[in-house]
Image (cartoon, helix red, strand yellow):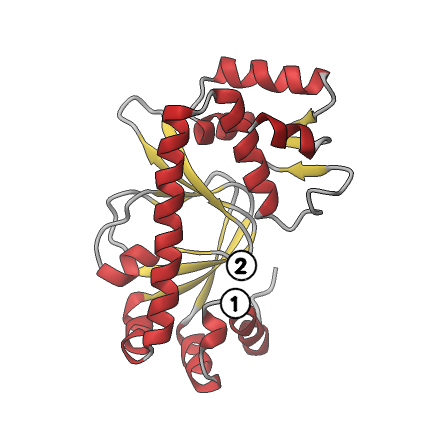
């Protein structure tokens, strides 16, 4: 796959909610510093504790953000798809990565180093405010996840996780006949904080009831309204 041309990179920046706020000269400046990196499915992008010196925009594919445990388990915090950015915490404070990032499938990322982005951020308070808004939204989501684990049962958490992922992908809307999500059952269990056996039990029950279908590495939603009623 060929790397994007200068003009293709410009279109990527202009279409983005954050970078689209930049002037033409600012975009050209960042394009000269940016680079494209590709990751195969399952490859680590960065690990918790590593220096956070770059911000990343997903051009293609999906990226899983997770927290590892000492016994080898993980909790999936969120999944980023095309158009999303991540790594902004390390860019803003220059500290360590707060979680692991892993390519869920073949990913193409646009990389901006902190040293190249910070001069623009220091001049553009409006862009800083957008970044702060994004951080606040993610903090609210994390708080909601903790609340769900405490107060919701597993089936409800699973339904909520699937619908949330469907809303954030480029698949057909929830009113469509079916929505295929490339989310392995193991990852869904990590998002919903459920054991492999319990998650599989609920998925098989949903399949028998015609709510979903299961394929290798994918879950196909057949009845989104039924999932909404489970939340």
Q: At 32% across and 32% down in the image, what residue appears?
A: 68
Q: Secondary structure at mark 1?
A: loop
Tag 2 near tag 1, CB within 8 Å = yes
How many residues crowd around disc 2 within 10 Å: few (fewer than 14), some, or many (20 or more)?
Answer: some
Is residue 136 something that shows in the picture?
yes
Residue receiving disc 2: 83
Residue at x-position 56% and y-position 41%: 165
Report which residue position mark 1 lands on: 16
Q: SS at mark 2?
A: loop
Cα–Cα gap, marks 2 and 1: 7 Å
x, y percent for residue 95: 21, 54
Q: Position of residue 46 (x, y in %)?
A: 35, 47
The correct choice, above or below, for 189 with respect to 113 in the image is above
Q: Name the residue rendered at 40%, 52% in the picture.
A: 137
Few, some or many C-alpha atoms within 10 Å of disc 1 (few <14, some 14-19, many ≥20)?
Answer: some
Q: Name which residue lies at 69% across and 26% down.
A: 212
Of the pair 18 and 217, the residue shown nearer to us: 18
Q: Is residue 74 left or right of residue 158?
A: left
């Amino acid at each position: 796959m060929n790397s994007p041309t200068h003009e293709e990179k410009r279109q990527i920046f202009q279409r983005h909610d954050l970078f689209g706020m930049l002037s033409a000269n600012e975009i050209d400046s960042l394009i000269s510093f940016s680079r494209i990196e590709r990751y195969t499915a399952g490859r680590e992008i960065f690990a918790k504790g590593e220096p956070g010196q770059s911000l990343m925009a997903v051009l293609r594919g999906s990226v899983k953000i997770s927290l590892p445990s000492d016994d080898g388990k993980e909790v999936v915090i969120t999944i980023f798809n095309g158009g999303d950015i991540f790594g902004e915490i390390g860019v803003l404070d220059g500290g360590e990565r707060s979680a692991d990032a892993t390519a869920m499938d073949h990913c193409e990322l646009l990389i901006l180093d902190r040293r190249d982005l910070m001069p623009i951020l220091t001049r553009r308070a409006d862009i800083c405010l957008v970044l702060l808004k994004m951080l606040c939204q993610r903090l609210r989501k994390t708080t909601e996840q903790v609340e769900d684990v405490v107060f919701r049962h597993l089936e409800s958490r699973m339904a909520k996780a699937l619908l949330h992922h469907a809303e954030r992908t480029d698949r057909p809307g929830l009113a469509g006949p079916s929505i295929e999500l490339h989310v392995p059952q193991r990852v869904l269990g990590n998002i919903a904080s459920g054991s492999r056996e319990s998650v599989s039990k609920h998925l098989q029950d949903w399949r028998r009831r015609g709510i979903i279908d299961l394929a290798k590495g994918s879950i196909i939603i057949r009845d989104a309204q039924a999932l909404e009623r489970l939340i």
